[in-house]
Image (cartoon, helix red, strand yellow):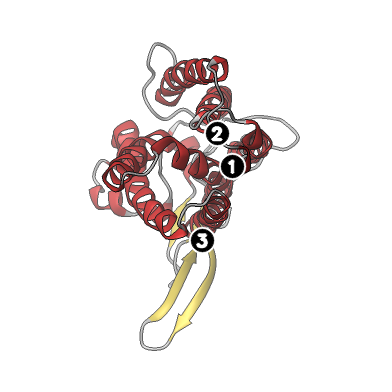
Amino acid sequence: MRPVLFILPLPLVGPIAIKSYGVMLVLGFMCALFLAVRRARKEGINPDIVWDIWMYALLGGIIGSRAMYLFENYQSFSGRWLDIFKIWEGGLSFYGGFTLATISISIMLRIRRIRVLKMFDIIAVGLILGMAFGKVGCFMNGCCFGRPTDGPIAVTYPAGSPIDGYGHMRPSYAYQWHLDAGLISSEASRSLPVHPVQLYESVNALVIFAILMLFYPHRRRYGEVTCLLGTLYPATRFILEFFRQKQAEYVFGLTPAQTYSLIAFVVFATLFVISRRSQPTVVPRDEG
């Protein structure tokens, strides 16, 4: 766990803590943007449009993902409501961000009369790559931690970590959770060993990214890459949820994320199958 990468000393202002979560989000965003611009050029689309799309995606994604996270974990903010705005400390939901970003981008593309599904395919590959970086940020920040385990790759989190350049500390999320649950005593220096589920999710995102890259030249209709992402990610996220520490309320014995995953999987898998069975192919060969 390393929520602060380094301290940047600034004259007059004082020390500024550079947060690992924010740095990884920026790296993921830039890699995703670079990939989308490169793909857009290959398919004859003005790269400037991609920049505009990513700004809408960034704004909608942050607002939507934070709103969904707050909806699922509102009880953890009781008594400290100003922490709602501290997104640099972690706490974003993929499905909330994906939903609002999709709506924002769709509206913008419709206004500009640009083929929506074609652009979604371009964005989809970069999106999952960006997530791989974001999950590493979660691991370094200590949020979205896993369930206790005795496995060989289990990790523990310290009782506290520095959060700025003034010596202020905060308990790690896993440590505080285990302490409140009575699983460890206040004398314990570290949390229980837990699954490094954030790294599981990062590797999972990289695998999906590789699959999408391999599939891209073989798509028959616009939107198939997006549907494949919408099929693979929910299926794997459903499984990975069993390794995460469940902090939100259950829905029929499932976490909210598992419920969303089931719905998304059914919808996108159905659309993908229908698209693959449809004829004729509408994607030009030079866009593969």
Task: Return the residue at label 2.
Answer: 283
Q: Position of residue 13 (x, y in %)?
A: 36, 82
Residue 159 left/right relative to 86: right
- Earlier residue among tags 3 and 1: 3
Instruction: Say what secondary structure mark 3 lies in.
Output: helix
- Residue at 62%, 43% (x, y): give it: 286
Residue at screen point 52% across, 47% down = 138
Residue 142 lies, with reference to residue 3, above or below; the image says above
Q: Nearer the viewer, residue 87 or 119?
A: 119
Quick one: SS at disc 1?
helix
| Extreme residue toward the top, this view | 252
Q: Hey, which quadrant is residue 264 in on the image? A: top left
Closer to the eye: label 3 or 1: 1
Q: Do callouts 1 and 2 mark residues in contact (Cβ within 8 Å)?
A: yes
User: Is 95 or 154 nearer to us in this picture?
Assistant: 95
For mark 1, does the 10 Å Cα neighbourhood hold few (<14), some (14 to 19), or many (20 or more) residues? some
Q: How far apart are marks 3 and 2 (CA)?
A: 37 Å
Disc ID at residue 64: none
Amino acid type at mark 1: Glu
- Residue holding disc 3: 23
| Residue 254 picture location, percent across and down | 44, 17
Q: From the viewer's perspective, is 233 left or right of 260?
A: right
Q: Which of 99 and 116 is in front in this view?
A: 116
Total marks placed: 3
Q: Mark 1 points at which residue?
A: 287
Q: Where is residue 118 in the image (x, y as percent from the top left)?
A: 47, 39
- Name the image quarter holding the C terminus: top right
- The one of 154 and 49 positioned closer to us in this rendering: 49
